[in-house]
Image (spheres, rainbow, N blue to C red):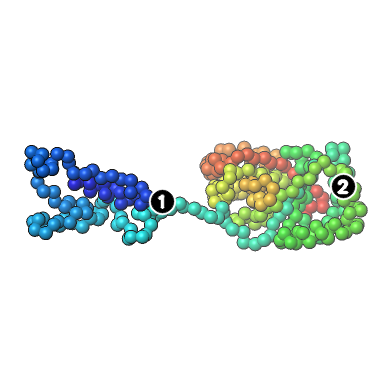
């Protein structure tokens, strides 16, 4: 009986005060009072953790002090007025492992604006001719990285990349363009009616990538876009890097830059590639399917992937990157 009482008292010590107050301990065994005709059993000594103190002259020696024995899994109870033992155990043993950052932090403010324009099919050639003649009015305000015409993966589209040192710089550029009468008259007023839609996206270079130039002029450019599962680079960054860099090797394509979206479709990463020709790209694709190094890296990354798309592009004559 005393062992049962001791166990219940120990369990009650682990519960908050409100809960432990509802724990009832069994009273003395019925039928052992005076006149019952029954002889009581041996005097119950204070067992470990019973909380009983021997009376004077009882001939009993105090048992060991109540407390957590070796291997008991219990920690000493809190001092009076402190927070319940249950709370302490829960907080210490179940601390969540949280990584506040979703990936490597940007080391600078430079970003790249991706722009895609869809052109009315019958005006595609006229739009490219106009842009070729008037692009200098635009590049007088900020740096153009490249300007391409999409050949595969979208028709009657152009894709261009602009570099900015900060959002404030871009805001200043846009304000200046809106006040440039020649730009508005000679280009904007003529080009806008030719377009079906415009889309833009703010991206950063991923920390392990640097913008590079193609090894030679000409060739074909590929923009592969990968929509990753939510979680950020902290979840899929290493796997994506391994998959991309496995293709960036002699005999394969040339990686010119890897970008991570900041505004637009989030959790999107883009890889800009260069190939000698569309046929060379097709040959590389077939070869990579039997390259164990590439296959292993791609398999490790594909579980983080939601969807992907790409487009093959040719640089315009006025594109700095070509």
Compared with residue 152, is residue 260 higher up or lower down, i.e. above or below? below
| Residue 218 x, y percent position in the rendering | 76, 48
Q: Quadrant of residue 117?
A: top right
Q: Which residue is found at the position 17% from the left and 39% from the top?
A: 30
Please name whichever residue, 291 or 119, is drawn nearer the observer in this view of the structure.
119
Disc 2: CA contacts within 10 A as few (<14), some (14-19) or many (>=20) = some
6 relative to 90 in the view: left or right: left
Disc 1: CA contacts within 10 A as few (<14), some (14-19) or many (>=20) = few
Compared with residue 161, is residue 290 higher up or lower down, i.e. above or below? above
Note whether residue 242 is visible: no
Q: Quadrant of residue 213?
A: bottom right
Earlier residue among tags 1 and 2? 1
35 relative to 128 in the view: left or right: left
| Residue 114 x, y percent position in the rendering | 73, 50
Q: Which residue is found at the position 23% from the left and 48% from the top?
A: 6
Please name whichever residue, 233 or 85, is drawn nearer the observer in this view of the structure.
85
Q: Quadrant of residue 220?
A: top right
Q: Which residue is found at the position 69% from the left and 48% from the top?
A: 264
- Check contact, mark 1 vs mark 2: CB within 8 A: no
Residue indicated by mark 1: 94
| Residue 165 x, y percent position in the rendering | 71, 61
Residue indicated by mark 2: 191
Q: In the structure shown, which secondary structural element does the residue marked by tag 1 occupy? A: loop
Q: Which residue is found at the position 21% from the left and 51% from the top?
A: 50
250 relative to 84 in the view: left or right: right
Spatial CA span between label 1 and label 2: 61 Å
User: Quarter holding the N terminus?
Assistant: top left
Note whether residue 83 is visible: yes
147 relative to 62 in the view: left or right: right
Please name whichever residue, 109 or 286, is drawn nearer the observer in this view of the structure.
109
Q: In the structure shown, which secondary structural element does the residue marked by tag 2 occupy? A: helix
Please name whichever residue, 251 or 78, is drawn nearer the observer in this view of the structure.
78
């Amino acid at each position: 009986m005393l062992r049962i009482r001791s166990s219940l008292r120990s369990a009650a010590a682990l519960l908050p005060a409100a809960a432990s107050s509802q724990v009832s301990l069994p009273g003395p065994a019925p039928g052992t009072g005076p006149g019952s005709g029954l002889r009581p059993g041996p005097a119950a000594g204070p067992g470990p953790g019973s909380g009983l103190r021997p009376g004077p002259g009882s001939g009993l020696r105090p048992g060991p002090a109540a407390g957590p024995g070796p291997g008991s899994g219990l920690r000493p109870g809190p001092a009076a007025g402190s927070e319940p033992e249950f709370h302490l155990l829960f907080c210490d043993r179940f601390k969540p492992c949280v990584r506040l950052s979703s990936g490597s932090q940007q080391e600078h403010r430079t970003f790249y604006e991706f722009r895609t324009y869809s052109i009315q099919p019958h005006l595609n050639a006229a739009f490219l001719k106009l842009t070729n003649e008037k692009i200098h009015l635009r590049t007088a305000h900020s740096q153009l990285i490249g300007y391409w015409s999409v050949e595969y993966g979208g028709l009657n589209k152009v894709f261009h990349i602009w570099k900015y040192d900060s959002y404030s710089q871009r805001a200043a550029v846009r304000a200046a363009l809106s006040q440039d009468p020649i730009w508005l008259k000679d280009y904007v007023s003529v080009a806008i009616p030719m377009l079906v839609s415009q889309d833009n996206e703010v991206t950063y270079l991923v920390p392990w990538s640097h913008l590079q130039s193609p090894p030679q002029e000409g060739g074909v450019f590929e923009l592969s876009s990968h929509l990753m599962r939510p979680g950020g680079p902290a979840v899929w960054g290493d796997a994506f890097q391994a998959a991309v860099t496995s293709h960036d090797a002699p005999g394969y394509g040339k990686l010119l830059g890897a970008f991570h979206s900041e505004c637009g479709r989030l959790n999107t990463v883009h890889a800009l590639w260069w190939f000698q020709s569309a046929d060379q790209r097709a040959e590389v694709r077939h070869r990579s399917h039997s390259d164990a190094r590439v296959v292993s890296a791609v398999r490790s990354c594909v579980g983080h992937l939601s969807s992907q798309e790409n487009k093959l592009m040719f640089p315009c004559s006025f594109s700095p990157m070509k």
